[in-house]
Image (cartoon, grey):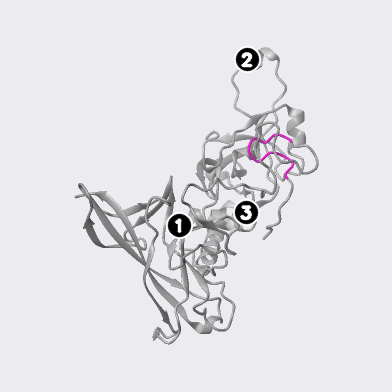
Amino acid sequence: MDTTRRTPRFCPQCGAPLPPGDPRFCIECGHALSATPAITPPPSSAGRMTVRLPNARVEQSVIGGTVKLPSSGAIPPGMWVLDEPPSVQAVVAIYAPLRAVVGGWSGLSGQGWRRTERQARAGSRMAFTFVAERVWFPAPGCGGGLQLHVTIAATAEAEEGRERLGFRYREGSNPPMEITHAEWHASDGKTVVEHPIPAIQIMAPPRIPRVSDLRETIRRVSRGEADRWVDGSAARGTYQLLGGDVQQRTPAGRGLLLVEVAEPERRHWLQRFFVLTPGHYRARIERPFTADLGQWKQQVKAIQREAASLGLDIETDAAVEWWLDRYGYDGVIFTGARQKYQCEQVIVAFRRGQLVRV
């Protein structure tokens, strides 16, 4: 996994070429550049607390727990490598079973949560409490074989009389989630009462910024500028977008689908005005993951196992996006795609800023 920072050659927001050296901002759109990673996540919203943990490259949201202040030193499941279990001075991270939605997170009954009680609030509103049981575990062979079983509680409101199949959680708007119970279990399942309970930090799953999360546009450039722009790209051809520049659900998660086409001949200026042709694009993808589409299901199963080994009980698309980002891939090239897409190879770009139109 490559977590080093590098000076970008093109603006990550608008795609314009940057001057040599270490520019502080893009002269085309004004986007700040100093000390920024290759992919800049969206800015934190008001009331949102984030930290960086060793199981992902992106900042992750802290949504509750017994900690007074968020800790970047919290240890996620599967990453405790000491022989003894965490002490009372340690901080462990536990993940709530949430799904990313626009503006927050969603928790569903039957998918990790169950409703336990409701309470009348002002007016016609009701407060509902949902609980989930989670398990924190050390790396294999570490931590004395102990596992920490934790019960998480979340409170949500709704109009009275509406059936609650789940809840919506918004950071900064909903109260922090709470730990209602925690106890150590030995490998045989018996409760261990003599070992103290560490501080517990409740985390939302890693949320990887993709197309709709980033305010980027696809620039239109000349062929010469496009040729210079794709220098260093693993995708050097000319492409068309399948489905337009709107975010799509692809086998690699959210993204933009591209198929390679023959480079069009130069047209007379009258043709450019009166003849409609599909848009042609160039893609700048420096470190793609290449896979045969027919074998992708096996790869996804391996990704899900790796996510589960780190306590990330997340849906398939979120797991794929997390894994690709964790290992620094900025796109996916699928070969053997003819049966699904009527062409031998398709490319998945993760951002509009990776494309230019020619």
29 or 3, which lies in front?
29
Work out how far the residue at label 1 is from the one at label 3, CA to CA, in angstroms.
21 Å
Marker disc for residue 315: 1
Q: Earlier in the sequence, mark 1 or mark 3?
A: 3
Q: Is residue 207 left or right of residue 23?
A: left
Marker disc for residue 206: none
Q: Which residue is mark 3?
A: 291
Q: Looking at the image, which residue is at 50% across and 41% down?
A: 248
Q: Identify the residue at the far right of this view.
A: 20
Q: Position of residue 186 (x, y in %)?
A: 44, 84
Q: Main secondary structure of the magenta part?
A: loop
Mark 2 crowd level (few <14, some 14–19, many ≥20, 10 Å Cα)? few
Frontmost of labels 1 and 3 is: 1
Magenta highlight range: 8-17
Q: Identify the residue at the far front of this view.
A: 68
The quarter of the image holding the N terminus is bottom right
Instruction: Determine the image quadrant of residue 228.
Output: top right
Q: Which residue is mark 2?
A: 273
Above or below residue 259? Residue 200 is: below
Q: Earlier in the sequence, mark 1 or mark 2?
A: 2
Q: In terms of secondary structure, where does tag 1 sit?
A: loop
- Identified by mark 1, the residue type is Glu
Q: In terms of secondary structure, where does tag 2 sit?
A: helix
